[in-house]
Image (tube, grey):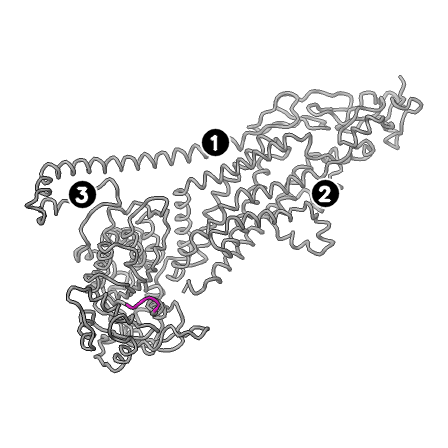
């Protein structure tokens, strides 16, 4: 047999082994090399022009001589170099296989398979999606059943009313009368928002008395204030408050009134310690102190209805109670108290209704305002401040809120509220009123019932049919005959008897321990915040499904791109077969890593910024009330893990079933999972720095830019030369890319010089576990930065 090369018949080629070996290397096929013929050692022959073209394009050309080895063809395996056998069913054989590789349990490998098609991820996604679909279907059916029962009551009651009372109601002679049967009828509408029930009365507060006494160690402690020369001057030199003096009586409802810009809200914020005053003194129960020292015993109701709109009425109030009530209370005691509180606020009929917003319908504006108050009453406070609790409500809803506030003073709670142009009944419900003139100066502080007579003595006129509160506002704003400057001067000359109650000697001895004992333990707050966040995600299932779909779509697009390529990695053959190597394609896997990082950012960043950006105002409120910021932050982050697992699973499942990469599914998913962890951490930082409406776009842009640190474009080798390798080391993309590179090239270490390929990019092979751990640490690193931004920015709103 002639062993001459095909393109150069005059030569039989160059021996590949110096020792004259007559066997073919593992994974190579050379049927003419045999140990019985000494001259049949593997040889390299000069390539033909067509072979040169094939090798330059990364293809393996046909043998150029009878003794030249070639890698075992894809879909086949070569156990001894003499035989090339088809890959059996249930196995797959990539190029250069010396033995078939078994498929995974959930993989599909027909005969002559080059790689396996694994359905593990798709099956897992289907099981999860079906379970979630069943859960939400059950919840929806329960909701329909509740609605049907309400509809039945509506039809029954409506029929009764229409048959017995409609003619009486519509008759001309009874237009000015209300039939008792109709007046006492409690209508239950199908729409929860329109349910009609009587206003809260003193009897509905009786169950709360025992709870308040228990929360205050068996006593009803009262708090009053005395302030002297209270002032606030801004850095710009503007004087907002100027020498406000007076007292606020305990267990009374005090209104703060004045024209717009007079400093009403500013005074209240200065009084309760949210804004630092520049002058003046404050006494609490006869002792000079600051209100923020008792923050766990104080309630502050902001003007805006700051609460989680995805939760129900009870869930919002219950969370506040769990976190702020004494840690000695049991879950049953907390639940019973919350139910009593909801009943006292006249919210029992809507306690299981979500708060809702402008898009998703929930409770009414008046009900939402009462929930806003209930969140603070949940802590059993001894004093509560309210910033315009009636703003944005109609007169009836505003009156109902004020009646509730009036009733809770019977529990010993001191109520201080900023009000703006109240109706007559609301004004008369207040015990005292502080009237602030423009410039933050006191024009009157005393009983609300005596305000009109005081100003009449100063020459102000009140029309008999006019609302006294409206007239007083006109007087303070200078629209009446009186001059606001003269009113301030007259009040300084006016002396009234100090109405402050005698100081209890043991007030501070009791209050300080109470303030310390309030609040759930740190670990329980983590659990409460975690559970609440999970409940939020269930209520916003649409956005969750959208994120899963976007991840699945991104994985599908990448899978299609991968499947269209002949191979993800082509390196140089191991010695001595190196001279037979085709042109390498060592850049494909780094590009895949780069695109994976980009796709993960695109899929995860828009949803990631919403974790915190959508509820920063809720955090500020809770932090100012004594919640643990760290517990809140840990709980929220722990609750996102489930979302990260499921969304990254959809991404990896689509990529793996379509692209069929050589990497195993478990490691493929872990790499995408840790990338999602990093994206969520980086997006958390973005959400702390920019406004909510700008955060999604900026998070996507930053995530795309951050993909540069994957090691493609700027390699780790170049980064080390330029002294910026540390920027890559703190990037989750760098470690995820290295893990992916290692998983994609190491399966071919029997065929290619994978270590030389890794050196080209600066990657270190065979440390996937370490890389995954480092990627997680990088995600935690960004979360730590986000936490410090959370607690350090907007400090004034957390006081």
Q: Mark 1 sits on what residue?
A: 126
Question: What residue is at 38 percent from the left and 72 percent from the top?
Answer: 240
Q: Which residue is at the front of the view, 112 or 251?
A: 251
Circle 3 is placed at which residue position? Answer: 187
User: Where does the magenta region start and end?
Assistant: 257-261
Q: Marks 3 and 1, how far apart in space?
A: 45 Å
Q: x%, y% of residue 64?
A: 84, 24
Callout 1: few (<14), some (14-19), or many (20+) C-alpha neighbours within 10 Å? few
- Residue pushed farthest bottom? 493
Q: Is residue 614 visible?
A: yes
Dot 2 alpha-carbon crowd within 10 angstroms: few under 14, some 14 to 19, many 20 or more: some
Q: Position of residue 689 (x, y in %)?
A: 51, 57
Q: Main secondary structure of the magenta part?
A: loop
- Comparing marks 3 and 2, which lies closer to the viewer? 3
Residue denoted by label 2? 758
Q: Are marks 3 and 1 in contact (CB under 8 Å)?
A: no
């Amino acid at each position: 047999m002639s062993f001459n090369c095909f393109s150069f018949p005059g030569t039989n080629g160059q021996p590949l082994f110096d020792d004259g070996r007559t066997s073919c290397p593992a994974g190579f096929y050379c049927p003419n090399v045999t140990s019985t013929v000494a001259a049949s050692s593997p040889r390299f022959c000069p390539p033909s022009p067509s072979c040169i073209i094939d090798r330059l394009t990364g293809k393996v050309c046909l043998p150029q001589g009878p003794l030249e080895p070639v890698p075992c063809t894809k879909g086949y395996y070569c156990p001894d170099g003499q035989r090339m056998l088809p890959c059996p069913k249930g196995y797959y054989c990539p190029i250069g296989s010396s033995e078939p590789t078994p498929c995974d349990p959930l993989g599909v490998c027909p005969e002559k398979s080059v790689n396996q098609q694994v359905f593990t991820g798709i099956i897992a996604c289907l099981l999860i999606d079906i379970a979630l679909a069943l859960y939400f279907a059950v919840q929806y059916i329960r909701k329909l059943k509740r609605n049907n029962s309400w509809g039945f009551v509506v039809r029954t009651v409506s029929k009764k009313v229409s048959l017995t009372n409609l003619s009486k109601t519509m008759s001309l002679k009874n237009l000015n009368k209300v039939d008792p049967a109709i007046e006492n009828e409690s209508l239950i509408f199908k729409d929860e928002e329109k349910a009609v029930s009587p206003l809260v009365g003193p009897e509905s507060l009786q169950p709360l008395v025992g709870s308040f006494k228990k929360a205050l160690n068996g006593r009803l402690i009262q708090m009053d204030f005395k302030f002297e020369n209270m002032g606030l001057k801004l850095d710009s030199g503007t004087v907002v408050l100027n020498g406000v003096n007076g007292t606020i009586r305990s267990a009374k409802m005090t209104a703060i009134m004045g024209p717009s810009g007079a400093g009403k809200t500013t005074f209240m914020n200065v009084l309760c310690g949210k804004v630092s005053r520049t002058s003046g003194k404050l006494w609490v129960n006869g002792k000079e102190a600051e209100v923020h020292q008792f923050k766990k015993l104080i309630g502050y109701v902001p003007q805006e209805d700051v609460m989680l709109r995805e939760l129900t009425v009870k869930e919002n109030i219950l969370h506040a109670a769990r976190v702020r009530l004494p840690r000695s209370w049991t879950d049953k005691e907390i639940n019973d108290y919350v139910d009593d509180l909801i009943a006292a606020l006249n919210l029992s009929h809507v306690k299981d209704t979500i708060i809702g917003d402008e898009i998703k319908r929930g409770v009414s504006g008046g009900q939402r305002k009462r929930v806003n108050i209930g969140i603070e009453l949940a802590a059993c406070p001894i004093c509560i401040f309210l910033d315009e609790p009636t703003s944005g409500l109609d007169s009836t809803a505003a009156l109902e809120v004020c009646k509730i506030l009036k009733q809770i003073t019977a529990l010993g709670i001191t109520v201080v509220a900023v009000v703006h142009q109240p109706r007559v009944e609301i004004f008369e419900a207040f015990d005292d009123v502080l009237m602030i003139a423009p410039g933050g100066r006191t024009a009157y502080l005393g009983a609300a019932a005596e305000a009109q007579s005081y100003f009449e003595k100063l020459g102000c006129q009140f029309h008999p049919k006019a609302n006294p509160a409206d007239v007083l506002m006109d007087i303070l704003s200078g629209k009446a005959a009186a001059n606001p400057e003269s009113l301030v001067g007259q009040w300084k000359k006016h002396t009234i008897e100090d109405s402050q109650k005698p100081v209890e000697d043991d007030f501070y001895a009791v209050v300080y321990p109470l303030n310390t004992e309030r609040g759930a333990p740190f670990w329980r707050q983590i659990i409460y915040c975690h559970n609440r966040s999970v409940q939020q995600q269930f209520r916003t299932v649409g956005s969750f499904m959208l994120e899963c779909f976007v991840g699945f779509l991104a994985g599908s697009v990448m899978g299609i791109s991968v499947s269209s390529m002949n191979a993800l990695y082509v390196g140089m053959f191991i010695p001595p077969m190196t001279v037979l190597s085709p042109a390498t394609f060592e850049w494909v896997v780094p590009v895949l890593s780069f695109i994976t990082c980009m796709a993960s950012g695109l899929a995860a960043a828009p949803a990631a910024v919403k974790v915190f950006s959508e509820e920063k105002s809720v955090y500020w409120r809770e932090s100012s009330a004594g919640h643990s910021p760290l517990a809140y932050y840990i709980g929220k982050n722990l609750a996102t893990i489930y979302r990260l697992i499921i969304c990254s699973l959809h991404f990896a499942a689509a990529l793996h079933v379509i692209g069929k990469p050589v990497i195993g599914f478990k490691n493929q998913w872990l790499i995408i999972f840790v990338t999602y962890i990093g994206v969520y951490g980086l997006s958390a930082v973005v959400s702390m720095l920019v406004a909510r409406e700008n955060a999604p776009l900026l998070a996507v842009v930053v995530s795309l830019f951050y993909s540069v640190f994957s090691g493609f474009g700027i390699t780790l080798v170049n980064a080390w030369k330029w002294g910026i390798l540390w920027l890559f080391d703190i990037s989750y993309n760098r470690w995820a890319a290295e893990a992916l590179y290692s998983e994609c090239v190491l399966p071919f270490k029997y065929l290619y010089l994978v270590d030389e390929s890794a050196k080209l990019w600066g990657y270190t092979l065979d440390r996937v576990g370490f890389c995954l751990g480092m990627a997680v640490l990088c995600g935690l690193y960004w979360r730590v930065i986000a936490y410090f931004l959370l607690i350090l920015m907007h400090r004034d709103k957390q006081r």
